[in-house]
Image (cartoon, rainbow, N blue to C red):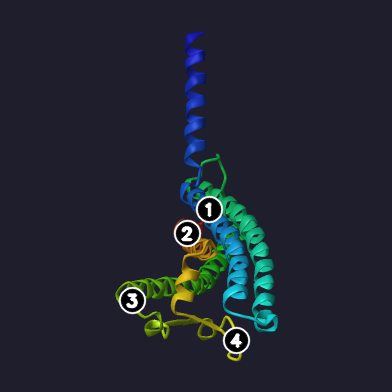
């Protein structure tokens, strides 16, 4: 009786070890990072764009026609964000499933399970698509740094204005220090005023709208970086597993 119970315990233990060994931990971590990064990028990016529209409309443009193009772009990109969130949610599930497949095929965990030519072709397809997405997302990562750079410069300029205001008795002596939204493509060149200068600019930097927008863009930039890291992390195990499967296929193991 005790011997049978012991054999059952050993069998259960072996099954647990096999199941744990079949988990693609790098792909699992990459999936969690991808979801966390996309949550930051999409959620904070959506709100940052809305705050940007309000900030530009309030402080940098008097005529609604001046920011009409920018408002249309923001609405369009917000819809793109919805599509990106849905796509990466589904793609993360597919890559995790593919990670389970290749890990199981490499380790040959489940009895006579072997990889097939179709399975290796599918793995190669995922690798190529993920490489393409990584290059595209590298551009998105760089693009998301632009508003952070703009707001950082704006905050730095406000800091300089505050220092000059403490040391210079006349406000008009540093009213030439400006931030021009037209230089960054936010507004057309004929937009009025299109820029903010002196103590008016310093007052804008003290508003809650500015700090909220700045923090949201930083979070968006960080989310894009985490997503890029997740895509790279996907590529490492999937490429390795595919190389092993190709090696096994050449040896005639089907």
How many marks the image carries: the answer is 4
Residue tagged 4: 192
Residue at 46% across, 56% down: 237
Q: Is residue 18 above or below residue 167?
A: above
**Residue that protrudes farthest toward the left in the picture:** 167
Q: Cα distance, mark 3 to mark 4?
A: 26 Å
Q: Nearer the viewer, mark 3 or mark 1?
A: 3
Q: Nearer the viewer, residue 63 or 85?
A: 63
Picture coordinates of residue 123, whole percent (x, y): 56, 60
- Of discs 4 and 2, which sits in the foreground? 4
In the picture of the structure, the residue carrying the numbered disc 1 is 36
Residue 34 placed where, x, y %? 53, 56
* Residue under pointer 3: 164
The label shown at residue 108 is: none
Mark 1 secondary-structure assignment: helix
Tag on residue 226? 2
What residue is at 56 percent from the left and 51 percent from the top? 96
Distance (Cα) linking label 1 and label 4: 40 Å
- Using the image, determine if residue 146 lies above or below residue 220: below
Query: Which secondary structure, mark 3?
Result: helix
Q: Which of marks 3 and 2 is nearer the N terminus?
A: 3
Local crowd at mark 2 within 10 Å, few (<14), some, or many (≥20)?
Answer: many
Q: Do the residues labelled 1 and 2 touch (CB within 8 Å)?
A: yes
Give the mark, 3 or 1, whose residue is nearer the N terminus: 1
Structural distance between the alpha carbons of marks 1 and 2: 8 Å
Q: Earlier in the sequence, mark 1 or mark 2?
A: 1
Question: x, y (%) of residue 238?
Answer: 49, 58
Can you see residue 120?
A: no
């Amino acid at each position: 009786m005790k011997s049978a119970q012991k054999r059952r315990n050993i069998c259960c233990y072996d099954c647990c070890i096999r199941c744990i060994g079949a988990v693609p931990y790098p792909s699992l971590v990459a999936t969690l990072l991808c979801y966390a990064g996309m949550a930051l990028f999409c959620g904070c990016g959506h709100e940052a764009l809305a705050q940007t529209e309000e900030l530009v409309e309030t402080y940098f443009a008097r005529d609604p026609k001046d920011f009409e193009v920018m408002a249309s772009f923001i609405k369009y990109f917000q819809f793109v964000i919805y599509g990106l969130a849905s796509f990466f949610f589904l793609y993360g599930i597919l890559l995790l499933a593919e990670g389970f497949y290749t890990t199981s095929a490499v380790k040959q965990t489940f009895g006579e399970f072997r990889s097939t030519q179709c399975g290796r072709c599918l793995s190669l397809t995922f690798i190529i698509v993920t490489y393409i997405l990584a290059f595209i997302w590298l551009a998105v990562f760089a693009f998301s740094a632009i508003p952070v750079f703009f707001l950082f410069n704006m905050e730095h300029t406000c800091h300089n204005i505050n220092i000059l205001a403490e040391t210079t008795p006349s406000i008009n002596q540093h009213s030439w220090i400006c931030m021009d939204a037209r230089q960054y493509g936010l507004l057309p060149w004929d937009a009025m005023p299109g820029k903010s200068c002196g103590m008016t600019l310093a007052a804008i930097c003290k508003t809650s709208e500015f700090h909220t927008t700045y923090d949201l863009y930083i979070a968006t930039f960080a989310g894009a970086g985490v997503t890029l890291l997740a895509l790279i992390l996907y590529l490492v195990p999937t490429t390795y597993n595919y190389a092993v499967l190709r090696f096994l296929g050449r040896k005639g193991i089907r």
